[in-house]
Image (cartoon, rainbow, N blue to C red):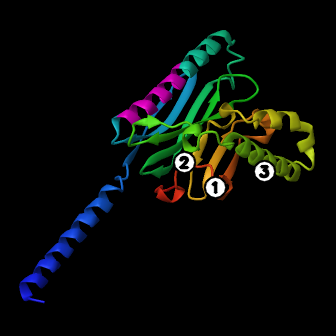
Amino acid sequence: MSKPRIILYVIIALAAGVIGWGISQMSQPAALSFVKAGMEDDLEAYSVEVSYPETDNENLNREISSYIESGLAQFKEIAQENWQVFSPEARRGMRGVFITEYEIFSNREVVSMKFQNYQFTGGAHGNTYFKTFAYDLENERNLALEDFFQEDSDYLDRISEITRAELFDKFENEFEGAARGIENMLNLGTEAREENFENFTLGAEGMTFFFPPYQVAPYAAGPQEVLVSWEELDGILKFDPQRLDIRS
């Protein structure tokens, strides 16, 4: 083989390698960056302590801000109204409290994050509730649970069965056989309906589902969470979990 032909083959090979590398880099979306932000308020009627992420994606920022501002406005209105109704003596211990914290679990193709909120506006005790985001960066939208599963699959039945069995065993062990006494609440809270599993995050091992107090158990049991592994969801997912850049 002549020297010019060898040089030509080397140039072609190098060019193909560079192009291939470029394509592989393009197929991996850049990780989203986050900066921790927050707000605090300390008034006579209530206190507020909120932390949330600011990202370099404006649409996601708007989604997060809308959620925070809506919940905060509702809390302030209720807390202020209750404060006006309480007598000076009754106000002791009845000051409103609003606390929001967050965690981020993945940040490349899908941004998975969980907000945990504690709110007290008077009464015997406050309450905890959740809000999760699974934000599709390519299509700029928040994904619902159904978006992760193949059409006509039995994903809700499968998730319902797994979470119900896991929680039943947990309550049996932690509360010394008391699961039978709350079985109706547990069955209703894990019924195969989308709204029962709307709060979830994506992790390296699977999807974690979050249940606030009163959904699957009495308040004293506290909030609950159940991990459903990717293996348990095998065959009905729309995507390969290995493609996610999972970070917690």
Q: Position of residue 116 (x, y in %)?
A: 59, 39
Q: Earlier in the sequence, mark 1 or mark 3?
A: 3
Q: Position of residue 175 (x, y in %)?
A: 88, 48
Residue 207 vs residue 105, the one in the foreground = 207
* Amino acid on which disc 1 is placed: Asp
Q: Main secondary structure of the magenta part?
A: helix
Q: Is residue 26 left or right of residue 211?
A: left
Question: Which residue, given by chain and number where applicable, does mark 3 sit on?
Answer: 166
Q: Is residue 180 left or right of residue 105?
A: right
* Amino acid on which disc 2 is placed: Lys
Q: Residue at x 73, y 29 (%)?
A: 125
Element at label 1: loop
Q: Residue at x 70, y 33 (%)?
A: 193
Q: Position of residue 87 (x, y in %)?
A: 69, 12
Question: Which residue, given by chain and number where applicable, does mark 1 sit on?
Answer: 234
Above-or-below relation of 197 to 124 = below
Element at label 2: loop
Residue 146 vs residue 222, the one in the foreground = 146
Comparing marks 3 and 2, which lies closer to the viewer? 2
Element at label 3: helix
Which region shows up in magenta? 59-73
Above-or-below relation of 173 to 12 = above
